[in-house]
Image (tube, grey):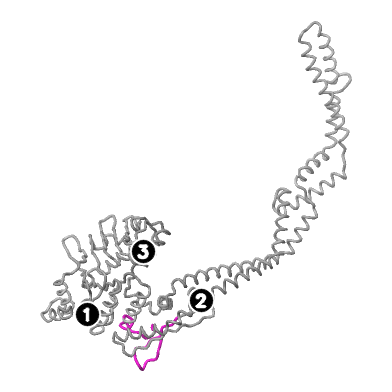
Amino acid sequence: MLKSLYIKNYALIDSLEIDFEQGFSVITGETGAGKSIILGALSLILGQRADIKAIKQGESKCVIEGAFDVSAYDLKAFCEEKGIEYDPGNYILRREILSSGKSRAFINDSPVSLTDLKELGSQLIDIHSQHQNLLLSDTRFQMQVVDALAGNKELLKKYQQAFHFYKQAEKALDELKESVKKSKEEEDYLRFQIESLRETALQDGEQEELEEEQETLTHAEDIKSALFRIHSLLSDDDSGIVSELKESLNTAQQLAKVYSKSDEISERLQTAYIDMKDLASEMDKLANDVEFNPERLAFIESRLDIIYTLQKKYHVETIADLLALYEEFKRKIESIESSDEQVVLLEKEVREKHEKMLALAQQLSDKRLAITGSFEKELTDRVAYLGMPNIRFKCDIIAGEHPNIYGMDSVLFQFSANKNVPLQPVADIASGGEISRLMLCLKSMIAGATALPSIIFDEIDTGVSGEIADKMGEVMREFGKSMQVIAITHLPQIAAKGKVHYKVYKSDDEAATTTHLIQLSDAQRLDEIARMLSGSTVTDAAVQNARVMLGL
């Protein structure tokens, strides 16, 4: 239940702090006094989006804080999932709106996202405002009512998870089939590419070797001539380097007896002589090996032309890239060849998920159908008590052909308030007062089934008065015996039924208008009920009537 509400610098509120009680409480006040402001503030700590215009003019931020007693509810799993400090008894929800446009949310002083705040808030309190009466014509709301009464919360979660998995598998199957279709369309092309690459028998590194050999063959005469020239310069009998080195070596060796460093000189000349002699021999051999071979050059040029053509065709630069493409094409063919098997396996998975989903959908349908009779009777009895003795109500569970997020069913609420009017969809015939009474009864039944800690009715009494208003007040008072119920009302018949009475009013000074919320004493409450009965001028008759209504 909501234990207390603290509001600072919100709209017309400077600072407001009020405690709330268990049971049925009422909030009254003149039109425009600020009841909607208080509800707006409360909605912020329940996760609704904020507007910086809500900050009181001239202030840097506003703060709304609500304290809740949740000792009857196990929220440990929620706290562990969200990383919030767990308290088995009390929760404080706080929202801060800054003039910069930023907003901060806290649960038990732990910073949380707006989504987390909204998720927890939806489990703590339900605010039923006038526009929610329109929900009665919404088939999704009608389904939620039936599922709440049937106790389908956990079963529906399992079904929706199964529905999600089925849709995922179905999508994957469709994508696979489309991929297989496209792959089969390009299968012949792939096989042609594979064959063309296979026939070339490419070898990694082949291109570099061929390009080097091509360069050699193209310049064979120049290379042969240069090698012979080197050999001549090294080994010419008269002026070759080898001969000169041999003569230098002999001269150095003759100095051995008279010059101590001649041995070192001889050794170095000996090394140079051997190296140059070997080099001259190698130049002769290499020159004789180099031959211009036009047939070999033609083959190399043809082979390189094939390689260059393939590289250009596939937009790659190396044989390694072509070989990688060859392997990729082979993998695609293997995938195409095994795709039919993959489709069969995925079709089996889709069937299994579909069957599991349908089994859960059937359980939902069975539970919904099982409560329709008792639901129709209980709602009829409750609404009849509120001044519609001839009401007829029918809840149709209609089996569909295709699954949706709620199962295989759709729901249709049909209603008639008069004997001579046939049953028709609620939205087509119910008046404002009739919808108010239907929603009050539905909310009381849903809240009882879902064990919601608190509910606030914002002028749900629209369109009713007199005896019916008195009975609606009685329903809410009875309703309040099992949970916290707060009703914002303009009707004295309902206001008089409250266990605790709060009043919203405005005050003015030279600088500003301010909204206040106070809990009324017995005497103040008597005056307020009398004012609601007679208007601005309170008469003795109105006071006396108020005493009767309050049982004083």
Disc 2: CA contacts within 10 A as few (<14), some (14-19) or many (>=20): many
Whole-percent x and y of residue 156?
47, 72
Q: Residue at x 78, y 58 (%)?
A: 195
Residue carrying label 2: 361
For the residue pair 160 and 457, the one nearer the viewer reads as 160
Q: Is residue 76 above or below residue 443?
A: above
Helix, strand or loop at mark 3: loop
Disc 3: CA contacts within 10 A as few (<14), some (14-19) or many (>=20): many
Which amino acid lies under the numbered mark 1 shown in the image of this protein? Gln
Which amino acid lies under the numbered mark 3 shown in the image of this protein? Gly
Which amino acid lies under the numbered mark 2 shown in the image of this protein? Ala
Whole-percent x and y of residue 296?
86, 44
Whole-percent x and y of residue 353?
57, 71
Q: CA distance from mark 3 to mark 1?
A: 33 Å
**From which residue to which does the magenta span run?**
411-436
Q: Is residue 384 above or below residue 102?
A: below
Number of numbered labels in the structure image: 3
Q: Is residue 262 left or right of residue 12?
A: right
Helix, strand or loop at mark 2: helix
Helix, strand or loop at mark 1: helix
Observer-side mark, 1 or 2, equals: 2
Residue carrying label 3: 47
Of the 4 image quadrants, the one containing the N terminus is bottom left
Residue 333 figure quarter: bottom right
Q: Residue furthest left?
A: 540
Residue carrying label 1: 493
Labelled pair 2, 3 in contact (Cβ < 8 Å) = no
